[in-house]
Image (spheres, rainbow, N blue to C red):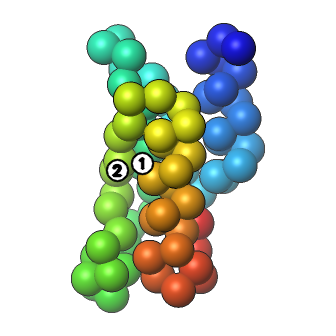
Amino acid sequence: MSFDRHLAEIAREFPDWTIWRSDAGRWWATRHHPLTSAQREAGCAMTIDADDPEGLREQLRDQGERFDGTFP
């Protein structure tokens, strides 16, 4: 599957994040909205990265669970 298709699928799955792949081949996601203090204290990050699309999905799911699963 092409990286463009992976990007589109992940973007649809996690609409509150901007997804991209760097020139170095790493997969990145950054939130559209700032985090609250409580979200940061819960371990939420504004930007995350991974080696591959599945690694990024895993981190995005983890981020969604960090604040009682109340936000993506």
Q: In the figure, is residue 11 to the left or right of 17?
A: right
Regarding residue 32, the answer to whether it shows in the image is no
Residue 7 position, x and y percent, is 62, 28
Q: In the figure, is residue 34 to the left or right of 9?
A: left
Residue at 66%, 12% (x, y): give it: 2
Residue, disc 1 = 30
Residue 47 is marked as 2
Residue 54 position, x and y percent, is 56, 37
Amino acid beneath label 2: Thr
Q: Secondary structure at mark 1?
A: strand
Up the image or down, 47 lies above or below 72; here it is above
Residue at 38%, 16% (x, y): give it: 25
Mark 1 and mark 2 lie on one chain; the one further toward the N terminus is 1
Residue 4 position, x and y percent, is 64, 17
Residue at 47%, 40% (x, y): give it: 55
Up the image or down, 42 lies above or below 33; here it is below
Quadrant assignment, res 37: bottom left
Residue 6 position, x and y percent, is 65, 26
Up the image or down, 36 lies above or below 47; here it is below
